Image: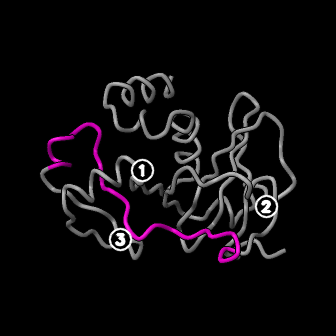
Amino acid sequence: MSRKKYGGIYEIALPENKYLYVCLIERLHFGVFDICPDKPINDVGEILAHPIKLYQACKETAVNKRIWRLVGMADLEQAGISYPELLAIYLAWNKTYSFEQLKAMKNDGNPVAISRKEYMDLLDKGLIYGFFSDYRAFEQWLSLFFADYPAGVLDCKIMTERIGAGSR
């Protein structure tokens, strides 16, 4: 199987024997499925039965170096999987700035100004931009925020507490 073909479904092993499943949708763009079992899943169909909970951008190092296990391939079009056109640029530690700027990241990597309503709709849907240059930071972020996403990343206090506890 090709290791870097779009539609690849990869398993990320988290602490405490938990697993997350991501789909490489396009270059640097991943969707994270809304499933976090305590045992590995080998059936792509079982993973695809769950919606994508969140989208993030991350360098593909873990895919290229075969750190994340390739479970199988999905036909993106048939599965109805695509990366959102817009993700809100939101800074939990500076909400005022975020709402003054009202920016979103386009799926081509360029920021764009949007209306307050569009911005609020993106936040309500959990369509929040993030880029991870290191897969380990992405894994750590997922272990801290996946369970109650997006609530944990929208609240500065929660985010600060979790990051502080996670770095000990």
Closer to us: mark 2 or mark 3?
A: 3
Q: Is residue 97 left or right of residue 159?
A: left
Q: Are the two marked residues, 2 and 3, in contact with CB atoms closer than 8 angstroms? A: no
Query: Residue 130 location, x and y as percent?
Result: 41, 54
Whether residue 143 is situated above or below residue 118 in the rendered picture: above
Q: Which mark is residue 125?
A: 1
Image label count: 3
Q: Which mark is residue 27?
A: none
> Residue flagged by tag 1: what amino acid is it?
Lys
The secondary element bearing badge 2 is classed as strand
Query: What residue is rendered at 68% in x and 43% in y?
Result: 35
Whether residue 39 is situated above or below residue 16 in the rendered picture: below
Q: Answer with the quarter of the image where residue 110 lies.
A: bottom left
96 part of magenta stretch: yes
| C-alpha distance separating marks 2 and 1 | 28 Å
Closer to us: mark 2 or mark 1?
A: 1
Q: Which residue is mark 3?
A: 106
Q: Which residue is mark 2?
A: 70
What stretch of residues is rendered in magenta?
76-99
The secondary element bearing badge 3 is classed as strand
Query: What residue is rendered at 32% in x and 56% in y?
Result: 88
Query: What residue is rendered at 46% in x and 67% in y?
Result: 84
Query: What residue is rendered at 81% in x and 53% in y?
Result: 46
Q: Residues within 10 Å of mark 1 (few under 14, many from 20)?
A: few
Query: Residue 36 location, x and y as percent?
Result: 69, 39
Q: Give 66 or 36, whichever is nearer the viewer.
A: 36
The secondary element bearing badge 1 is classed as loop
59 part of magenta stretch: no
Q: Is residue 87 left or right of residue 22?
A: left
